[in-house]
Image: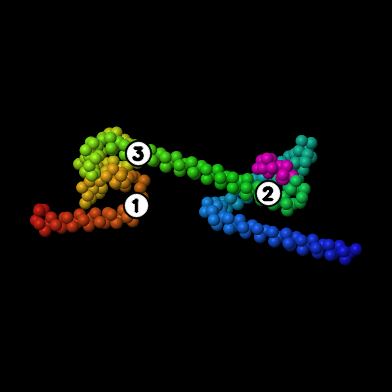
């Protein structure tokens, strides 16, 4: 009989080991994630925020532990607290299931009946799916809505500026090859256009003072080119290497013009 029991337990061990090989199927999930860039971004986001998430979960467990001790000392032995505050661990389980996972109490009760390891595995699963991933989903949706609203607002403001410029320009100028510097200086003084440019955070005074930056070595600009040139004067625009290169080219050209004037004795 003992030999049969030993052989039976050995067979069960072999079966459990074979079942572990089924976990190799999880590797297929990695292949699926590698083909979907968005999933990789989310996983990287979870890994980068893992320390903050673990710190938050640790703080939550400390709070639950402290209040579990308090409630156990206050309500142990009372009829109202029977089955919930008879011990610290039982109090922690009661507080966590009723506050953190109120909709999964039945599921966690069944897992607790299966054993402590199954119960901890279920808690880990709920923490990942119910708290981390779902809160990340909320954050992603909020970010997408915020970016979409910002892009739509900027496109609307840009269209308003373009329509205002085309409205103020004479018909012969719109049908011509481009907008000259003189026409632009007349248009930029319009109060309605100034107010519209202010909505997209354009420094109008700088545009008026330095139009040669936009029209340098050019006689006229089309409406799209003029819009791109105006956007360079936004207060929120970051300086790039191309801007520095254009500034260097502008200064070199100005120095060359000044040198030519000096050589021709046209400057005192």
Name the front one of labels 3 and 1: 3
Q: Furthest-right residue in view? A: 1
Numbered mark located on residue 159 in the image: 3
Local secondary structure at mark 2: helix
Q: Quadrant of residue 91?
A: top right
Q: Position of residue 40 (x, y in %)?
A: 54, 54
Numbered mark located on residue 239 in the image: 1
Colour scheme employed for the rendering of this structure: rainbow
Write down the residue under mark 2: 123
Q: Is residue 192 above or below residue 215?
A: above
Looking at the rendering, the stretch of residues picked out in magenta corresponds to 93-109
Residue 46 shows up from this direction? yes
| Mark 2 neighbour class, 10 Å CA radius: few under 14, some 14 to 19, many 20 or more | some
Q: Please report the residue visible at 69 percent of the width from the left and 42 percent of the height from the top.
A: 104
Q: CA distance from mark 3 to mark 1?
A: 24 Å
* Left or right: 195 in relation to 94: left
From the viewer's side, name the closer residue of 253 and 29.
Answer: 29
Q: CA distance from mark 2 to mark 3?
A: 52 Å
From the viewer's side, name the closer residue of 9 and 58.
Answer: 9
């Amino acid at each position: 009989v003992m030999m049969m029991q030993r052989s039976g337990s050995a067979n069960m061990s072999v079966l459990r080991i074979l079942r572990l090989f089924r976990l190799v199927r999880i590797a297929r999930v990695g292949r699926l994630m590698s083909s979907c860039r968005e999933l990789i971004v989310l996983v990287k986001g979870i890994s980068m925020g893992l320390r903050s998430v673990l710190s938050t979960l640790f703080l939550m467990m400390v709070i639950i532990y402290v209040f579990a001790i308090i409630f156990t000392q206050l309500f142990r032995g009372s009829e109202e607290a029977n089955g919930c505050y008879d011990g610290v661990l039982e109090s922690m389980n009661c507080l966590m299931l009723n506050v953190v996972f109120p909709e999964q109490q039945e599921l966690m009760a069944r897992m607790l009946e299966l054993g402590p390891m199954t119960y901890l595995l279920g808690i880990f699963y709920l923490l990942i799916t119910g708290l981390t991933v779902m809160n990340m989903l909320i954050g992603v949706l909020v970010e997408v809505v915020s970016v979409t609203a910002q892009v739509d607002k900027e496109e609307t403001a840009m269209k308003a500026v373009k329509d205002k410029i085309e409205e103020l320009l004479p018909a012969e100028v719109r049908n011509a090859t481009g907008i000259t510097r003189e026409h632009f200086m007349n248009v930029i003084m319009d109060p309605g256009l100034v107010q519209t440019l202010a909505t997209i955070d354009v420094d109008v005074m700088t545009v008026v003072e330095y139009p040669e930056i936009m029209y340098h070595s050019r006689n006229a600009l089309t409406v799209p080119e003029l819009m791109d040139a105006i956007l360079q004067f936004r207060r929120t625009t970051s300086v790039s290497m191309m801007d520095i290169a254009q500034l260097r080219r502008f200064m070199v050209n100005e120095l060359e013009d000044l040198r030519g004037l000096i050589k021709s004795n046209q400057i005192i």
